[in-house]
Each structure stands twice: as structure tokens, then as C-alpha cells.
Amino acid sequence: MKDAPGQRRLSEDPGPESGVARGGAQVLIFPEAGLAAVDDAGLVKMLVGGDARAPRVVWQRFAPLVHRLLRRAFGPEYDVADLVQEVFLVLFRRAHTMREPQALTAFVISITAHTIRYELRRKTALSWLRFGDTEVAAAAEADLDAREAVKRLYRILDHLSSNDRTAFVLRFIEGLEIADLARTLGVSPATTKRRVAHAWRRVVVHARRDAALVGYLASLRPVESS
Amino acid sequence: MKPADPTANPDELVARLVELARGASAGAPPAPGEDGLRSLELALLRRGRRPARVLWALLPAAALGAGAGVYALRERTITFEVVSGKVGDGGYVTSGPSQGAVRFSDQSDLGLEPGTRLRITDLEVRGARVMLEGGTLHARIHSRPRNRWTLAAGPYIVHVTGTRFDLAWRVDEQTLDLRLREGSVVVEGPLAEAGLKVAAGQHLIANANADTLSLEESGSGAAIGSSSTSSSGTAPSVPAVGAAPSGGSTAPASAEAPDPSSAASGPASGPERSSASNAPAAPGSRGASPSASGGQTLARGAGPVGHAREGGQASWGSRVATGDFDGVLDEAERRGLGRALAEASRSDLAALADAARYARRQEVAVRALTAERARFPGTVQARDASFFLAGLAEGQKSDGAALDWYDTYLRESPSGAYASQALGRKMMIVQRVTGAAQARPIALEYLARFPDGPYAPQARQLAEMQ
């Protein structure tokens, strides 16, 4: 029988890393390239089992998702590199607690959501410490560029509690369904709906107060309803 | 044609905001690639012990190979029985309105205070993994070689060999409260990533929300928990929580590094550990710093004012942390503000000051901060108070007073947690009041000391001016 490309049958290649288990059991080691096809449950198994290749595969699979979630939560100006690292460190530390290894994606999102909430609390505390420094430009005309509009949007999100903001970002910007969001946040669907509704109301209220932002939004093409 | 007003339709408004956010993140730098992975691998190496535990702990077992070994291991895995309490879905053990007790076959046992919830998630040959979901437990872990007992509470993990201790996890406050009675444990978690050894007689309080951690000598002080006697007989009978912490015997903590071998590499090992941590203090979080004037407890009443919480009322610090600023202020005023300022414990006074600042009660905030400085001179809280007083003065357009307070803070805490903020604010005020030329030397100092600080852009602008 021919092996899959790149696959190594260790019994034919005995060496220091032969991987031949005690009792003569044959162990196959797949190169990393082949690991991309491993499903989430298998990946968790590798991670918990101490497979040294697992962190890299997990990183390659989930770093874009984590990065995007954090970017959307904090805005493009925010340096999220350390937060991305933190998410993965927590993931590796907590992998063994997963009850449903096939739900690795949900687990990653959940850790990311927790990291977002934690970071938002830190950020809020920092803003308290700068309470003398509120140099918000007066709302002017609708001539904002997108960069300034984004800043104003995230300033609005700064008004939300960490829970509400996380819920808003994941529900509206990331597009998670309520049930998934509830699982991610670790609360009931009813609580999730309340949180989302509360966040939505606050965003609307604050956005309406920002004449410049509203003016900018009005200049955009209407959003196609999906 | 005039564009449509999106505010007329809130759904449309939100939809456009969402598009804006998505567009912004789409234009952001690409997701981290190999560089990020390398950083992660380095971080894993630095934190080696933890992932190693997670990732590699099972390797020896795997090396044991097949059946017989596994069978033998299973044979010796410890068991437990819930002597008193309820076992719910998902393996939850709850003590209900009365105390509970769990007894293990290795002669270890856990006493649960009323209302405590925990899960026993793993049973091993030489230990178990217990997740304390909330409440207080009294643990007595039978000492055996190569014990592998761990108790997790929130982001903290307590590694146990053989010891007796009280452990509380207050979910709402995200506060871990650990009091060692015998032996020692190693705690991992925020500010103790490298593991912090806690020895008999020591009392550790860590707050995950506020990113604070304090370790103090508790002597023979009160245990955590209620005063009622254990009904199971497994937990020691303990005096009530809230009693003055060890009276006057509270010693300056060996908080900085009780065991250099275990704490030196952690980020929490430096002086003024909690206040100087990277994470800025969250509301209500200032009161946990160990200081030279003696240890203190966080989120537990210690003074005459803060003591009136027998009805289960949370501490002022924890109430501030949950946003109950008005509640704290109301309670202080009910008791008499003057009395509160004169008698409140250091942590309560700090919480009162925070509550007043956050509720924009400037006058009360100034009085509380001034009282902090007068009553607890030399402490981290007193030094930090000058920074907050500066902020209050600045908010009231009192530039002179603000500058004085910022200078005071910078003089007293040149490496304090708020030093970069204080110097930055000072630079901004000087620029506004006396002009860029006078602010430039401060900007240069700022850039030399805090090149990546929050006021670095403004400092650079000033520095580049001729």
C-alpha cells in the first residue's frame, strides 16, 4: 500500500524519533502540511495529548478569526497583537477542559469574547484615569472622512459596558446568531437578547447625538439588506 | 439631492455603523502570521510550566502504552463521596443553605460553606481537579508524594501537595481569597503567571477584574467563611469573616517575593506589584497593594465603618467595582461623611474616593483623597491620591493646583503606575498655560522616560518644535 504523500511510516524509518511505541505498536507521524485537514476534535486531542505540532496548527487555523474579532471589537487603531497571543495562551491552557472538542471554534470565540471583555474593562479604567483629557472635537459638518467616522463609532462603543459591547460586536459586526452568542458569552439566550437590545439602543442613542457621524453615514450608500 | 437621514430609521443607522466597522477592520493589517506564531512560541516557552503541564502532562502516561498500565492507573484513581450536600447535573456539588462536605478516598476532604458550588472535573491517581465555581471551601489535602491536586477558581489555579487551607472565590468580584493554614501551595493566575508560592500563615487576595494581588502574613487570624461549626466534621470550625484581620499583628507582607524561586520570574514579583502592574487599576481596585505599612485585605471590611456588613452587604470596594457608586456614597453619608472619612479602613476610604470621583461628586472625592493622604501617609494609596487630586483639580480648571499635585505625585512615585500619565498631563497643562517652549523640556523628559506612553505623540510634536 502506498502511503499518502509526505506521510512517514516510522517502522520503516526507525531512528531517534522512531515513535514506535512500547509493545511494538506502530505510530505514524504526519508532517504539519497534512495536519491542515485534521478536524477540530482531532486537533483538540492533539493539543491535550501534548503533540508539539498542535499549537502551530491551531494558530494557523484560528489566528485570522481571533485577529478579526479583536479588530472589530477595538477598532483598527488598536494594537491587538498581544491580545491575540493572550487568547491562544488561554486556549492552550484550557484545552483540556473542553467538553465538546468538536466545538473548538466556539471555544476559541468564547475565549476571545472573554479577552475582549477583560481588555475593555482595562480600557475603561484607563479612560477613568484620563478624565481630564476629553479632547473630543466639536461635531462639525458631514465632511468627515471614514477614518474619523470609525474613530467616532468606536468612541460610541466606548460608552457601552464591556458585556454590552462584546454582545454588540459579536452579534452585529461579526454576525453571530443569538444561540451561538449565548453559548459564547455563557449566558442564557434571553439574557443575550436583553444585552444585545440594550447595546443596540445605546448605540443608536449615542450615534444620533453625533451630528458629524450621522452626516457621514447619510452620505454613504444605503446598506443592502441581506 | 440631500442624502437620506439614517437616523430616521435606527435599523438603517446601525446597519451603516456596522458596515463602517466591517470596512475598517477589513482595511486593517493582515492577521498575524509567522511572526505572531514565533512570539506565541516564545510566550509558551516563557510560561513553559503551564502549557507544559497542559500539553505534556499526558505524555508519560502515553509512553506507558496500552492496556495493563491504564488499567492499573484506573484501579488506583481516587474516588470521592459527597457526605453532605447536593450533587447536581454536570457533576456540580452544592452545599445548599447548610454546610457541605466532600470526602476523598485519599483521606483528603473539602468542607463547603453554605451556598458554595464546585465541580470535581478530574480524578487522578494522586489527586483531583476541583473547580470552585463560587463560595468558600475549607480544604484539607492529605499529603502524599507526587500529589497532583489542583483547585481552580476563575482564572486562578491553586496547586496543592499536602496542606490545609481556606479558599474563597467571589464570582461577582472576581476575587480569590486564600488563607494557608498548613503547608504551602502555588497559585497561578493573573499577576502570578509564573506561580506564586503561598506558605502557611499567609493570606493571598487576588482580584482578576482589577488585576491586583496582595499577600500578607495573616498569623492566626480569622478564616474565610462563616462562624458556624462544620456539620460534617471534615472542615475546621472557623471564626467569622470580617473580623479585624489579625489585629495589630498583621505584618508587612513578604508579598514582594515570599519565595524567590517561585515568584521571582513572575510579573508580580517587583515592588509595588499591584499598583505598578501593566493593567491600570479598575474602579475600586486600588486597595490591594501590599505596602510597607502592613498588609491589607481587599473587598472585606476591616474598619469600624466598613464593618457594618453583617447582612451580607458587599464591601465598598466590590460595590464600586460593580458600579454601585451612589450606593457607597449613600451609605457613607448615612453614617456621616466625617465619620467615614475619619474611621474607614484604607481600602474603604479608597473605594469611597473612587465612588465619589466616578459619580462626579468632586467635593467628596477631594475630601476622601485628602483623608487618604492624611491618615495613611507613605502608602501607595496615599501617593496615588495625589494623582487623582490632580485630575480633579484639572477638571475644575485649577491648573496651578493640578500642576502642584502632579509634581507631588511624580516626586513621591517617580516610578508609580500613573507616572507617565502624570508627566503627560503636566506637559499638556504647561503647554496650554505657558506655551510650547516651556513644555518642550517636559516633552523631552517624557520621551526619554516613556517613549511609548500615552502622551508620546504630543511629546514628539513638542520636541520637534524649534
Image: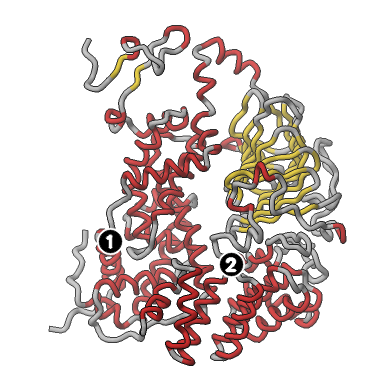
Q: Nearer the viewer, mark 2 or mark 1?
A: 2
> What amino acid is found at the position of numbered circle 1 in the picture?
Arg
> What amino acid is found at the position of numbered circle 2 in the picture?
Ala
Considering the image in quadrants, where does the C terminus of chain A appear?
Answer: bottom left
Please indicate whether residue B126 sits to the left or right of residue B453 in the image.
right
In the figure, residue A74 lies in which quadrant?
Answer: bottom left
Write down the residue under mark 1: B22
Question: Which subunit holds the residue at mark 2?
Answer: B
Name, please, the residue furthest toward the top: A23
Relative to B322, is B342 above or below? Answer: below
- At 41% across and 65% down in the image, what residue appears? A197
Residue B326 visible in the current orientation: no
Tell me where residue B256 appears, x and y as whole percent.
69, 54
- At 79% across and 64% down in the image, what residue appears? B302
- At 38% across and 11% down in the image, what residue appears? A26
Write down the residue under mark 2: B417
How far apart are the alpha carbons under marks 2 and 1? 35 Å
Question: Which subunit holds the residue at mark 1?
Answer: B
Tell me where residue B19 appears, x and y as whole percent.
26, 64
Q: Is mark 2 on a helix, strand or loop?
A: loop
Tell me where residue A87 appears, x and y as whole percent.
44, 48
In the figure, residue B141 lies in which quadrant?
Answer: top right
Q: Is mark 1 on a helix, strand or loop?
A: helix
* Nearer the observer, A176 or B221: B221
Considering the image in quadrants, where does the N terminus of chain A appear?
Answer: top left
Relative to A107, is A81 above or below? Answer: below
In the figure, residue B353 lies in which quadrant?
Answer: bottom right
Relative to B308, is B235 above or below? Answer: above
* Nearer the observer, B426 or B190: B426
